Amino acid sequence: MIIDPISIALITLGGVLIGVGVHFIPVGGAPAAMAQATGVGTGTVQLAAGAGLTGLISAGFMYNFLATAGTFGTSEFILVLASGAVGAMIMITVTMFIGQLVYVYCVGVPPVSAKVDKDPITGDRQDIYVSQGTEGHGVPTVSFVSGTIGALFGGMGGSLIYVQLMQIGNDPSNSAVVALAGIFATGVFYVNSVLASYNIGGTIEGFHDPKFKRVPKAIIACLVASLLCAFIAVPIMGGVS
Amino acid sequence: MIDPITGLGIVALMGALATIAGAAEDLESDVGSQSNPNSQVQLAAQMDFPHRIFNKAISGEPPAYGLWCATGATVASVLLAQNMSVIFAIAIGSLAGGILLGLYSVTAHMGRTASQKRFKQPVYMDMVVGHVPSIIAHGFIAVFCIVSFSYIMWQILGHPFPLPLLAFLWGITAGAIGSSTGDVHYGAEREFQNQPFGCGLNAAYSGNIVRKAESGLRNGIDNVWACAKFGGPVTGLALGFTVFFDNWRSTVFSGMNAIIAGLIIVFILILANRLVEVQARKAYGPFKDEEGGAEA
């Protein structure tokens, strides 16, 4: 009995990409929903999963279009990953932008980071705009860009897992295979985003946040977890020869 | 393969359905108080502020809406397989999803509130009777619209995912968007109208939520009345934009052009966010002087 090592490696890589991507997404959890912390006012897993799974829907569309049209080579593979990444990026930028409108025009607070004195991208002074008794509020440019990068990794990781499982199933017109690959990709996505969320411990502003230095630990944890997921998923999809 | 003009019309219809779904999803979470702002409702009684706000946090909104939408779509799929008409199948499926939401709302509210007996928080039975139908109604609209545009995507645009999986994924996305956008109106503004506008919420005021309404004691219905003026509609816009932009680029363009179109949308949104940021910094001004010392 031989399990395809390339499939295992690619699914594991997809999981690690998701874990890394979650660290880029600026989430302030419950405090951000009360304008007490910088970032989007929801949980890490919630936003990462929302974005990544929107990417998965886009990737599923693109894969079906390309796989049923003819040969599925490396360029098609990359195109599907890019489609998943862009789908996730669209979802997260729209969400962060509309969230920003609520912070600015409804709650009346300027977007500001409490972790750095100057925004690393725009150079704007941050500390003097932080309201008393809060840890920042809204989504400043650095967090916005960081969130977009996070969605890129997350969407790409989820799509990578889906495409690889579909390649093992090797029957894009069979809805049972599609459903199995889709739900497995969703499951692996949740495993890795929950793991990353534990590493973050509630809130993170993006790549400029000191908590971002914990990424190496997440990479190891996601590597192990995704490897286990891959060893379960590949045989179920029929990847044993 | 459908022609591009028809495709655009279909994508616009999906965007419209998603807009209604997003608004209803957020307003349901305001009537019932779900997601992050509910932490303050939960905390209020413990800080000696007993209240009449409905308290349900069944789970995070994304998995909750994933469940309601998957339930609705599964029932609809079974009925469609029995050759029922599409509208009736989706309506009955959504009703099943809505009733499930209502059941969880009752158990979550009564369980959470009863556990606060030591803080003298009463369980108001009239609140259960008054709020749950509104929760089910909003939930029904949200699930109906999400399952409907998932059906269009599956049946007409030819998405390969089965309907229940597609509705499940869009339910998670809808919940994530509702929890990230509209809930901020409820959590940061409506719950704390007793604080000066624009002050951000000092952590010291946690749990001190507004408990008196324009008339009488405030409840979830009063909250949804206010949030329907901003938080709900913008949540709808967010979900509508997501569904529309993501499908528009793959309908109008194909291959690498669809990717480039998506990246341009992302870039425009980054720039738009920067404009809003600059405007907000000018409008609200620094809260301290340049040395970071005294209040400006």
Image (cartoon, coloured by chain):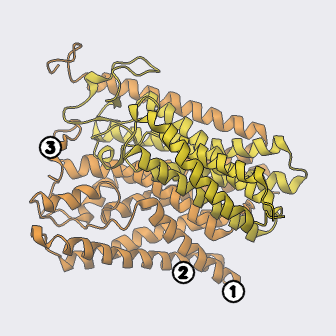
Mark yes or no: residue B189 visible. yes
B25 or A81, nearer to the observer: A81
The quarter of the picture where the C terminus of chain B appears is: top left
The percent coordinates of residue A144 (x first, y second) are: 47, 33
User: Quick one: which chain is yellow?
Assistant: A
Q: Examine the rendered structure and indicate whether residue B137 appears above or below residue A219.
A: below
Quarter holding residue B284: top left
Left or right: B34, with B122 as reference point:
right
What amino acid type is highlighted by mark number 1? Gln
Residue drawn 34% across the image and 55% down it: B228
Q: Is residue A217 left or right of residue B256?
A: left
In percent of width and height, residue A60 lies at 71, 55
The chain identifier of the residue carrying mark 1 reads B
User: For residue B163, which quarter of the picture?
Assistant: bottom right
Label pair 2/3, CB-CB below 8 angstroms: no
Q: Give me the C-alpha separation between circle 1 and circle 3.
A: 58 Å
Give the labeled residue for mark 1. Answer: B82
Q: Nearer the viewer, mark 1 or mark 3?
A: 3
